Amino acid sequence: HYNVFTGVDQEMNGQNMVELATLFGATSVIYAGQSAGGVAAISAASQDSRTIGVVGLDATDTQGAPGVPDFLGRDYAGSISVPSYALVGEPSTCNSDNNGVTLFEMMGTSQILQVTSSDHCDYEYPTDWACETLCLNEENLFVDEEIASTIAYLSTAGILALAGDSVAGTAWQDENLSSWIDMGLITRLR
């Protein structure tokens, strides 16, 4: 739900996510979203009693968009008590200076990791020329392939952990992240 004059309707996007889960007869749901989709996933999760987890990929809260209330995600995030995982990039205008981190901090049992040198485009697959023109991080301590594989590994492990895979759940434990933490590839924010 996007209109150039009124912005993105994250609440309607979240409602549509719940409707889709209902349409498919889901009994346990994990909501995930990238960028503005993170707010939609949070909105959906707060409305759906079937929610077992939330995953955010460089999620952003609403801020400064025409016709959209600022910080809409905060209206929903505080009511979420299921486990959640968030991966975030370096703060920039493209991810609203990581304002989505606040949403995951408001959730009861969230884990938040920042992937060093990652930009907003690294959380899209595939990305496009528009993102790369506006959001590319020019100072990289790590190559794009290493960043991409880290994001893919951790996001997949988060989803599998929420779905009940105990082995995948250990991927986010500090002892299993220690080599990436030591080399500076990731930083635990929470």
Image (cartoon, rainbow, N blue to C red):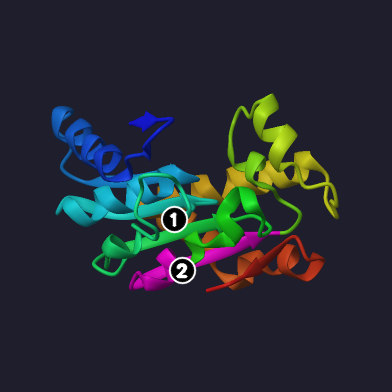
Location of residue 82 (image quadrant): bottom left
- Relative side of 119 to 162, left or right: right
Can you say whether 127 is above or below 15 in the image? above
Task: Determine contact: label 2, label 1, CB under 8 Å.
Answer: yes
Which circle marks residue 102 in the picture? 2
Can you give x and y, in whole percent of width and height, for residue 106 in the image? Answer: 37, 72
Can you give x and y, in whole percent of width and height, for residue 30 in the image? Answer: 31, 47
Can you give x and y, in whole percent of width and height, for residue 71 in the image? Answer: 39, 60
Label 2, label 1: how far apart the Cα atoms are: 9 Å
Marks counted in the figure total 2
| Residue in the picture at 15% in, 42% down | 27
Give the extent of the magenta segment. 102-115
Residue type of the residue flagged with mark 2: Thr
124 within the magenta span = no
Location of residue 134 (image quadrant): top right
Work out whether mark 2 precedes mark 1 in sequence or the reverse, and give the earlier one. 1
Residue, disc 1: 61
| Residue in the picture at 65% in, 26% down | 128
Q: Circle 1 sits in a helix, a strand or a loop, which is it?
A: loop
| Residue in the picture at 83% in, 44% down | 143
Residue type of the residue flagged with mark 1: Asp
106 within the magenta span = yes
